[in-house]
Image (spheres, coloured by chain):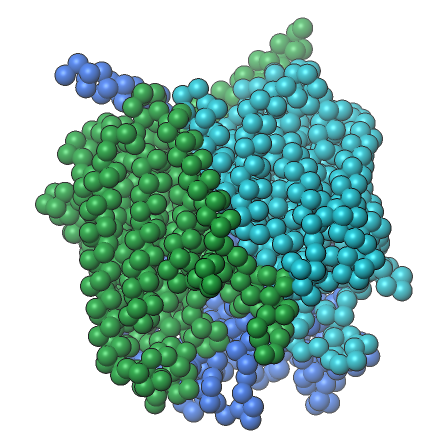
Chain colours: A green, B blue, C cyan
Amino acid sequence: MTDPSTNMRLKLPITCFILQIILIILFGVLVQYDEDTDAKKHHHGNHSEAKTDMENDFYYRYPSFQDVHVMIFVGFGFLMTFLQRYGFSSVGFNFLIAAFSLQWATLMQGFFHGMHEGKIHIGVESMINADFCTGSVLISFGAVLGKTSPVQLLFMAVFEVTLFAVNEYILLSLLGTRDAGGSMTIHTFGAYFGLMVTRILYRPNLDKSKHKNCSVYHSDLFAMIGTLYLWMFWPSFNSAVTEHGDPQHRTAMNTYYSLAACTLSTYAMSSLTAHDGKLDMVHIQNAALAGGVAAGTAGEMMLTPVGSMIVGFLAGIISVLGFKYLTPILESKLKIQDTCGIHNLHGMPGVLGAIVGAVTASLASKEVYGEGLEKVFPGVASGNRTASYQGGVQAISLAVTLGIALIGGLLVGFILKMPIFGAPRDNACFEDSLYWEVPGEEESHEDQMTAVKTEESDTLNS
Amino acid sequence: MTDPSTNMRLKLPITCFILQIILIILFGVLVQYDEDTDAKKHHHGNHSEAKTDMENDFYYRYPSFQDVHVMIFVGFGFLMTFLQRYGFSSVGFNFLIAAFSLQWATLMQGFFHGMHEGKIHIGVESMINADFCTGSVLISFGAVLGKTSPVQLLFMAVFEVTLFAVNEYILLSLLGTRDAGGSMTIHTFGAYFGLMVTRILYRPNLDKSKHKNCSVYHSDLFAMIGTLYLWMFWPSFNSAVTEHGDPQHRTAMNTYYSLAACTLSTYAMSSLTAHDGKLDMVHIQNAALAGGVAAGTAGEMMLTPVGSMIVGFLAGIISVLGFKYLTPILESKLKIQDTCGIHNLHGMPGVLGAIVGAVTASLASKEVYGEGLEKVFPGVASGNRTASYQGGVQAISLAVTLGIALIGGLLVGFILKMPIFGAPRDNACFEDSLYWEVPGEEESHEDQMTAVKTEESDTLNS
Amino acid sequence: MTDPSTNMRLKLPITCFILQIILIILFGVLVQYDEDTDAKKHHHGNHSEAKTDMENDFYYRYPSFQDVHVMIFVGFGFLMTFLQRYGFSSVGFNFLIAAFSLQWATLMQGFFHGMHEGKIHIGVESMINADFCTGSVLISFGAVLGKTSPVQLLFMAVFEVTLFAVNEYILLSLLGTRDAGGSMTIHTFGAYFGLMVTRILYRPNLDKSKHKNCSVYHSDLFAMIGTLYLWMFWPSFNSAVTEHGDPQHRTAMNTYYSLAACTLSTYAMSSLTAHDGKLDMVHIQNAALAGGVAAGTAGEMMLTPVGSMIVGFLAGIISVLGFKYLTPILESKLKIQDTCGIHNLHGMPGVLGAIVGAVTASLASKEVYGEGLEKVFPGVASGNRTASYQGGVQAISLAVTLGIALIGGLLVGFILKMPIFGAPRDNACFEDSLYWEVPGEEESHEDQMTAVKTEESDTLNS
């Protein structure tokens, strides 16, 4: 299937090369190893006493980093393979924009909160943060899945990463917000940004591609690979950049129980909302993850195991209800065509997570946290702010995030609407063959056997 | 495919909601963070000297936990996708009952051996133990795969987790048995419990679904994803809850060599027992894992690398012979319909592992273990029991496990036989569409291309 | 499909059993736990002061080991499932020869550089090294994929592991070469060895199997599972056996950025070299990994993030150009039939990595590395050799590796050419059914539904 308007022969190579060369130049000028990755600094840094090898941040965070990395590339990538003829693009564009975004995010995040004497210092924590920012872009990708060219996606990533870093800077550095697992910075931001982009890119005639906007049996199984890796590693995601020790431990455990409870409420709601009680793969693939999103802010706090379970339980219910009743309304009334239902998986659960975080923060006290208060709420521990003030900051942060995401998505949507990017036509959405060499269908096994046997008799006869 | 008797519209939601609400209430009343997850306790616990962050148990065990977690959700889940039309249920019910079981196991195991002043204290070690208990339920699931409703499975999990915790308590707490990787507590227990359940649920007319009780090409590849993750991460499984330091290191290595040797004997036996020397995917998917099961008890002991290899080598042989010759006999003579052949992967290798563990324990000595004896056999190290006494205890533990598993499976089988649970009819087993919305078949690519082209010409003509 | 010449009924079992029994005997005679795995030594070794549990090498390296392990079994295994009818063999033979090779490599590597008083001491580092050596065999497997019997592959592994250990010994122990991620020892060696083997095994009539030497839609998605796991975990691969602390941290980060840049140049080149701008899955699956290969030697050095990105960027370009223009020439002119294009993924990027390593080493200085020089270039730090001498040694090591690989591949190729190994005939290559029981095709869902309904009405009528 070839269409001159979607031919990427020049557009994609030029975009990739220019972006990568810019990245290389900026890295050359700006980026340096941090204390724990530099051969010289690690041994003779400005420490009063030297770190042992085991105290290198690598050993605290690298296993979590690898889990997050799997979520970004396999988790998000395969989750989106549910479409019958968009598997190459789901995994492949996910791969491309993630590889770009993690480099760009290193610069943008470093620029806003990693500068030391004019240089960006990087190590395993910045790698995790870059992957986090990438995750936000991939969430937005879910909203426009099947309706965008790879060049459009790269440009979306350029802008979204930048805005992500701005929002993150405002929250974490200016406001002192706590959001270790990114209910606000990652999920709410990525979701509402993506929803606004897809709103601006609204296609009134998308039903021409309707027959391809659905799954087949094996594509749903591939998607479950994505779901399960996201589900299993979400405890690592939420705990990856918390403080060392008990906060990392506690966050992982809170997320574990939130997800487990969410899974049960998802199955219950999926069956309850189907007219014949049958489970819907869309719900299982997506809503069962909402418990991880919703524990993203409060996970590092003393949410308690039971608190985590209640949060996850509610997140699963909200998410399935969203898929069942809200998504059709968003499409018909608000003209928001949300391919993967990111509003249900990242949007609403992200907002829920932000609210839970604000409430939990406002209840923080020395009685509950003891000396550990310093690690979770340094401002409260030092007496600079009260817990209820911190709760208010958390709530304001949600509003800020929503605002930047929606306005950002609006602007970026209009940029992406320009015809030069080679978006697919309405009748060719959700189709790999526009941007990929697609192999032929599998011959039936019997045909192959016949072919071989024919050749064999040929050989024998000759 | 709709059948009123299997409609889950009310049964599944009600079961899930009630179970989850009970869990939430019990967690609220009983469960607390342990020393390493609580912000307050970690910093001002009842230590004479404070732990450093790196000494938090999280850093010793969390990477192993994540590997175990992958085995439970992806390993077991995908291993069972080998059936041509049961992939949604294999992965999906595995997901559901695992998410339930890990919560319920936290309570049951905590009740029996994690209580502190009336509260259950939880952290990464309890999370691993909960996953272990879940693994046992999933083993039993393998025996009844394709023949049970999700509600039946949830009820099976309720009872099996409870009995698992009782058996584990008797072994580990009362008898002082060593079984870090669970040859007895997890594999033998799960296998014989499941075999007894499937015996009670015997279906004389199961051959009506025979044409679906087999694999197709791609379903076998999906199953290999499960196999490989189980195989690769089994060293983490067996070492996840051993003592810190050399026992964890040694257990992982012993299991690594046991599995490698097992793989070679599995391939050899698979080819040898086929009339034309062709390898059978069922053997590769399952028997190659028997080396992990068989190293579950003795793995932490000074089994030596060569000892591990011999154990794995034997386990592979036994397992393939079981698939080839014993499974048909179990079905025809003993009326045990064991869908996944858990007797060959978990049953016999589990018993082998228990025996190897008993023998290895009885040979333990201060000469071999030095000061390390304390970590593996504290009773022997303290002089409270001799090594041969420990060996006897290990042997008795196998008998206790078999007894509780068989009697428990008998009782639970009868409970699950009640018609209210919505089990499939004999001619509708091994079929996803009973409990899942199943998408249509993939259109052939050529048809799609034609469709697109037709639309394209329509567009051009209009 | 049955062919007496390829019947493995006796050949495969005998080969597996004999090899495994030899391994067991040699392990029994030669192999012992090392200090960190032995219960006695860990606690009362010949340390002046005892190690804490956390200083056990297990906690420094086991997470990396597990990532490498996934690359070997899932990464390599699934990467090769791209062929439409060779998925069982790709994953299954990969599994078999890896399980053998890791045991044999333990002995060979231990013999050359792990002997202590006549015994081979093993622990997590030797496990990683054994997996590395296995990786080299699997690279060679990629060249002959589809054209060899499992017995041939096992014999190839026997010889290749041995030669790998010899080459590794010459480089690392005799010459003092630095090659932590194995650009030379693993990738260059495995690639040129495999290319020479496939050259000797040249099949002039391979086009008889041409129709099977290609992918189908879902086989390409399975292959992407392999690609992504290799890509994600390559930072762990390159850093797995570097010194503790900053070198491990730095290597992982350098590889991360090399891979990211490589991915963008791969996408650019894939689109640029296609006549209609469409991306080619072969490039994405393979060339995007070249950045990991090319960072294998210099990754642990102070390559800087920008240096890593430049290396990855070039590696991606070279690799796609190789697939597009060099592979056809190699086949037509040099009679090298390289099924997976290992020359493009491992060969040329490996050589590039070796050269980059030599240059980077020759620029090493106390100013840049500080006290950390000791960990990366102990010879230079101690003043025994200059940095430029080290650079020269690195360059010579490349030549040595190429020499041993090519001569070794030549000899082993001739051995494997003997007809007794049961290689497939020219018209039956790339076909699972020669060595595997292959299940029938999936019935269409509609047929199944009809079948079920028919049976249902039968039941109702009866």
**Residue at 65% from the left image edge and 53% from the top image edge:** C301
User: Where does the image place residue A36, in percent across and percent down from the top left?
Assistant: 57, 65
Q: Is residue A112 left or right of residue B140?
A: left
Residue C236: quarter of image: bottom right
**Residue at 40% from the left image edge and 21% from the top image edge:** C276
Rendered position, C162 above or below C328: below
**Residue at 22% from the left image edge and 75% from the top image edge:** A392
Q: Decide if residue B439 is in sight here.
A: no
User: Where does the image place residue B402, in percent across and percent down from the top left?
Assistant: 57, 69
Q: Quadrant of the C terminus of chain B?
A: top left
Total number of numbered labels?
A: 0
Q: Decide if residue C321 is in sight here.
A: yes
Q: Quadrant of the N terminus of chain B?
A: top left
User: Where does the image place residue C246, in percent across and percent down from the top left?
Assistant: 61, 63
Kindly give the residue lying farthest to the left in the view shown. A333
**Residue at 29% from the left image edge and 64% from the top image edge:** A170
Kindly give the residue lying farthest to the top in the view shown. A462
Q: Nearer the viewer, residue B345 or A452?
A: A452
Residue A439: quarter of image: top left
Rendered position, C449 above or below A352: above
Q: Is residue C301 left or right of residue A214?
A: right
Q: Is residue C411 left or right of residue B424?
A: right
User: Where does the image place residue C438, in percent across and percent down from the top left?
Assistant: 55, 33
Q: Nearer the viewer, residue C126 or B430?
A: C126
